[in-house]
Each structure stands twice: as structure tokens, then as C-alpha cells.
Image (tube, rainbow, N blue to C red):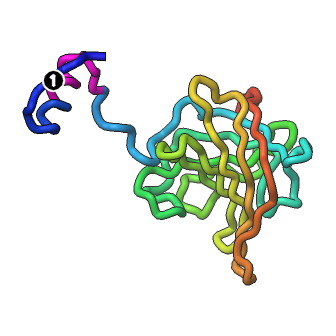
Amino acid sequence: MCAIRSRLPLAFLIAVQTTACGVKDDGPPPARNALREDVVGCLALFDERGHAVDSAFFNASPRVELDNVAVGGTASDGAPGAVWRLHRLDGAGRSMDARTSGAELESTWWADSLTDSVRLMFTTGFSGALFVLSVPAGSSDTLRGWVTEQGDAGPPFEFSRGRALAVRVPCRAR
């Protein structure tokens, strides 16, 4: 570590020490909900017991394809940034929904750079399941997190369904 001793104001010393020690400025951090290219692709989803996700999780699917097509500008948590299309897939990797232009209500995903996580939202507009999965630095093949279900009939309007796991799988050719 560089050693600089002086009676100059602290802010000046920090600026000089940072420059003198060669600390690199990588520029501004990524946008809060910027596209995470490292997670685009197909994932198999599992509950905390290791069972493939099924209809017990409202509107969710056992596999998903995270697309890089933006379908909105604000995530459901209110943070600005892009929201991306999520395609629901059955256990064999086949589409469960008609491919749409993005104008209709559909399942989406977004990344949160503040917590290094991705959020997968399966919704009908009234009820659905939300998976929040951590994306470890350097690897996006296995994601761990939790799942909640949200509904318009309550209270409670949201309840935990426990831990969740997502594992990268090959995507089927369309």
C-alpha cells in the first residue's frame, strides 16, 4: 500500500493516494436491471427437495428460456431498467406458450446488479410465482435462491415456497 503523510485535507489525500497507487476506474457500474448475457439461455427449475417445478407453483414451468428480447422498461420491483422475455418450457424443453410479439402479458425476467441476482416472474397479471436466484461470479450454470408465490386473493398476498435451484440445460432448436 502507498504511504502518503501530510497535513493536507483528507479528501485531497484520498484522491492523490488513489491516483498514486494506480487504482483503476472501471467506469460507472452496470445499470441496475441491465441484460445479463451470461444467464441468457435455458434453465431447468427445481424446488428445495430437488423435484422439477410443476403446476404446484402457480403459472411456473419446469424449464425456461431466458431471452434477450426486452419487453418492458421497469421491473415489478419498481427499479428502472429493462425487463426481458421468459419462455415457459415443459420438461422436454418444448414451448408451453405461443411465441408473441411481447405486447401481451407474459412471463418475464430481469437482473438486479445490486444483488447479483436474476428474478424470474411467472404471472397471469393477478397471481404467479417469483424465483430470485443468485448468479455467482464466474459461473452461471447453477443458480440457487428462493421462490415465492404471489396472489390477488389474500392476505397474505405473498408467501414463501422455500429454496429453489436452476441448472443450465441445452435449448431445443426452434
Q: Is residue 24 magenta?
A: yes
Which type of secondary structure does the marked residue at label 1 adopt? loop
| Observer-nearest of 166 and 100 | 166
Q: State left or right for residue 87 relative to residue 10.
A: right
Q: State left or right for residue 82 relative to residue 155.
A: left
Q: State left or right for residue 128 relative to residue 40.
A: right
User: Where is residue 145 drawn, in percent x and y?
Assistant: 71, 46
On the rendered image, what quadrant is the C terminus found in? Answer: top right
Q: State left or right for residue 16 relative to residue 154.
A: left
Q: Is residue 161 visible?
A: yes
Q: Is residue 152 magenta?
A: no
The residue that appears at 31% across and 27% down in the rendered structure is: 26
Instruction: Name above or below for residue 92 compared with residue 102.
Output: above
Q: Amino acid at mark 1?
A: Arg
User: Where is residue 110 drawn, in percent x and y?
Assistant: 55, 48
The residue that appears at 55% across and 53% down in the rendered structure is: 101
- In the rendered image, which quarter is residue 74 located in? bottom left
Residue carrying label 1: 5
| Observer-nearest of 106 and 27 | 27
User: Where is residue 123 drawn, in percent x and y?
Assistant: 68, 63
User: Where is residue 118 drawn, in percent x and y?
Assistant: 59, 45
**Classed neighbour count for the residue bearing mark 1: other residues with Cα under 10 Å, few (<14), some (14–19), many (≥20):** few
Magenta-highlighted residues: 15-25
The residue that appears at 80% across and 55% down in the rendered structure is: 162
On the rendered image, what quadrant is the N terminus found in? Answer: top left
